[in-house]
Image: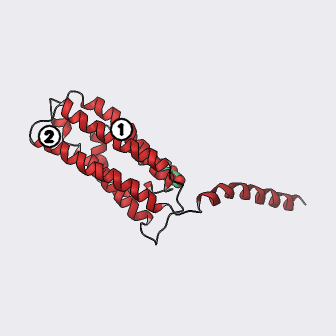
Amino acid sequence: MFASRSILFALVAVTALAKPLEVRQTTNTNAQIEQVVDSLDESIHIIIPNILTLQAQERATDATIGEQITQLATAFQTSTSDFAQIPISSGSTTDSPTNDEISVFYADGLQQVASGLSGLGQIPELTSLSSMMTALDPTIAASVQAFNKTLPGAIGFVNTLMLDAQQFLTLEGLTQTRSALGFA
Ligand SMILES: *[C@@H]1O[C@H](CO)[C@@H](O)[C@H](O)[C@H]1NC(C)=O
């Protein structure tokens, strides 16, 4: 009697836990997620080359770089609100875009950002660099969290792909981004 009541209790508990999981596993929204990553990636591939050009032409100032960093922050904020509007994906390991394809795509953008900003610390004119990074950091971290929420666990593979580039995040003081990516 005691044993069967325990089993019943265990079953009820398992059912209660299983319900929210069933809800999240109904729809594969990977195609919508990819569109958001694509649009973020497009912005990154405009802004980072702009920053590198300003550096190369010795036109990197608080004003010129600051404007680009603001645009970068806006791009990440847009991705965060766009991710949040997509139903949590059941994901797919077989149908393109697969979970891994999207993670590779997202990680590529983050790598561009991490390495693209890594030279800025050597420009003495950039007296506001650390406050720029302080403003940028939470916008990237929020995007990473929203991405990992809408495509559950996708950050796991992004973490692996970022193992080399994480040194730049440290250099740039992007600590919230590091921790959102699962780095200590
Ligand atoms: C990413 O999402 C998974 C599954 O929802 C969760 O277990 C994990 O803690 C999240 N990772 C990070 C770094 O937030």
In the picture, measured across the screen, residue 142 lies left or right of residue 124, that is right
- Asked if disc 2 and disc 1 are in contact, CB closer than 8 Å, the reply is no
- 70 or 133, nearer to the observer: 70
Q: Which corner quadrant of the image does residue 77 belong to?
A: top left
| Residue occupying the point 13% across, 40% down | 55
- Which quarter of the rendered picture does the N terminus lie within? bottom right
The x and y percentages for residue 162 are 33, 54
Where is mark 1, residue-wise?
137
Q: Residues within 10 Å of mark 1 (few under 14, many from 20)?
A: many
Q: Residue at x 27, y 40 (%)?
A: 171
Q: In this rendering, is residue 116 above or below 26?
A: above
SS of the residue under disc 1? helix
The response on whether ligand 1 sits within 8 Å of label 2 is: no
The structure residue drawn at horizontal position 34% and vertical position 53%, both measured from the top left corner, is 39
Q: Looking at the rendered structure, which numbered label has been put on residue 54?
A: 2
Q: Is residue 147 left or right of residue 71?
A: right
Q: Is residue 114 visible?
A: yes
Residue 158 x/y as whole percent: 39, 56
**Residue 91 falls left or right of residue 4:** left
**Residue most extreme to the left:** 57
Q: Nearer the viewer, residue 106 or 75?
A: 75
Q: Is residue 94 left or right of residue 13?
A: left
Q: Nearer the viewer, mark 2 or mark 1?
A: 2
Q: Count of labels shown?
A: 2
x, y (%) of residue 83?
A: 46, 50
Q: Position of residue 27 (x, y in %)?
A: 56, 62
Where on the picture, by quarter, is residue 17? bottom right
For the residue with label 1, is its CB less than 8 Å from the closest atom of ligand 1?
no
> Residue 156 sits in which quadrant?
bottom left
Q: Nearer the viewer, residue 122 or 101?
A: 101
User: What amino acid is found at the position of numbered circle 2 in the picture?
Assistant: Leu
Q: Which mark is residue 106?
A: none
